[in-house]
Image: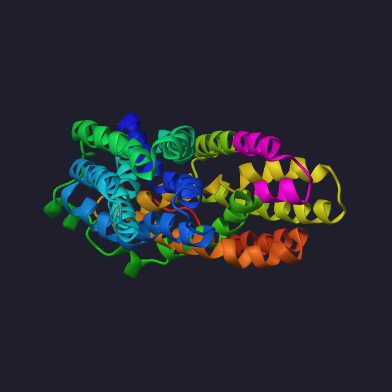
Amino acid sequence: MLGLGMLAQTAGAVFINGAAFLIPALHDDLGLSFATAGILVAMPTVGIMLTLIAWGVLVDRVGERLVLAIGLGLTALASVAAYFTTSLPILGLCLLVGGMAAASANSASGRVVVGWFPPKQRGLAMGIRQMSVPLGVAVAAMTIPSIARDHGVGSALLVPAVICGLGAILCLGVVDPPRPDRAAAERQGLLVNPYRTSSQLWRIHSTSILLVVPQYVVWTYALVWLMSDRGWSAASAGVLVTATQILGALGRMGVGALSDRVGSRMRPLRWVAVSTTVTMLVLAITNWMDSPVSIVVMVVASVVTVAPNGLAFTAVAEFAGPYWSGRALGMQNTGQYIAASLVPPAFGALAAVSFPVAFLVSSIFPALSVPVIPADHESKD
């Protein structure tokens, strides 16, 4: 089940994140400006924000298997439709619809992992599942740019079409995690809206929104910083950024395993928030001092800033329970995507003034998250 959950999330990531690798072909072959091409390839992200909660509601209603199969199937169809179109507006519509469909994997694959693994193994399992996004980005990076250059944008979108189509078929083999019937769930209080009875979920969502700011500052500007501020070549900077992605994925696994060992999601989350605050502050200081140590600190920042994702995701599913976790996970991701979409322009303006200033300001957000992080709670799963 973990493998199928990872496959579903990876397939969705190939479509959503792979769109960005179409920019060179859209610019060079179709003559679009970078700004116009950027708007076009942002359509999958817009689509995913529109439907995350709706897919979560459907997961809670009909289960994970059908949602994964239907969602990935629709993503594959949107990719095939994009292959046949020569109209840029219709291409944008296909990317939007594909993103709306690919959002199904976020909540459903998370529910599969949480539902089938006991609490003492769940953190590690979710950390492994969280590796799906960098894996999907890697697959897209290795295939889409070269195909788009040699055979056109439409042909490049056959890559996510094939992967998502295969994923949809294989996800028919997903077995929905066991959960009590609705009558038993009602007696156990599992049908009660957790957002009305506690501030726990709201605090976890708020924490994740604050923590996503330094994460996307590093993701967005590490390459640019290495090249423009540190004087690295594009090739060398690309190698280092790729290496940090791998280290970040391993870091997610490590933090998840740590949460299993200490029997807590919130304590490691608090440790990560404090570590992120300190790391971004040190990065700002060493960069301001023009110290070569800042490069090492950037590598550390690339690891610690992505570490909390799996912890918060697991905690949300555990507290929401089997009849509310789908929409709760949708709410979790929606807030993060909205915040993430605001980071590049806001911190781009700060970075234009000074990278140390941008890093310093980004350290404020994880510091603000520390008092927001709630105490641990009893799992309802």
**Camera-side residue of 99 and 370:** 99
Instruction: Tell me which residue sits at (77%, 56%) in the image.
Output: 284
> From this viewpoint, which residue is outermost toward the left?
183
- State whether the magenta stretch is mostly helix, strand or loop: helix
**Camera-side residue of 58 and 45:** 45
Please tell me whether residue 97 is drawn above or below residue 252 in the rendered image. below
In the displayed structure, does residue 378 sit left or right of residue 115?
Answer: right
User: The N terminus appears in which quarter of the rendering?
Assistant: top left
Q: Is residue 229 magenta?
A: yes
Instruction: Give the residues drawn in magenta, as a range.
Output: 222-244
Instruction: Tell me which residue sits at (45%, 41%) in the image.
Output: 133
Instruction: Tell me which residue sits at (57%, 34%) in the image.
Output: 246
Instruction: Tell me which residue sits at (18%, 46%) in the image.
Output: 180
Instruction: Pinpoint residue 210: horizontal percent, then vertical percent.
Output: 56, 62
In the displayed structure, does residue 206 sit left or right of residue 366?
Answer: left
Total labels drawn: 0
Q: Can you see residue 247?
A: yes
**Camera-side residue of 353 and 279:** 353
Q: Can you see residue 324?
A: no
Please tell me whether residue 3 is drawn above or below residue 363 in the rendered image. above
- Way the structure is coloured: rainbow
In the displayed structure, does residue 77 sit left or right of residue 25?
Answer: left
- Can you tell which quarter of the image residue 351 is in? bottom right
Instruction: Pinpoint residue 158: horizontal percent, then vertical percent.
Output: 32, 38
In the displayed structure, does residue 274 sit left or right of residue 333?
Answer: right
**Camera-side residue of 349 and 37:** 37
Instruction: Pinpoint residue 244: horizontal percent, then vertical percent.
Output: 62, 37
Instruction: Pinpoint residue 359: horizontal percent, then vertical percent.
Output: 71, 58
Q: Is residue 63 magenta?
A: no
- Can you tell which quarter of the image residue 197 is in? bottom left
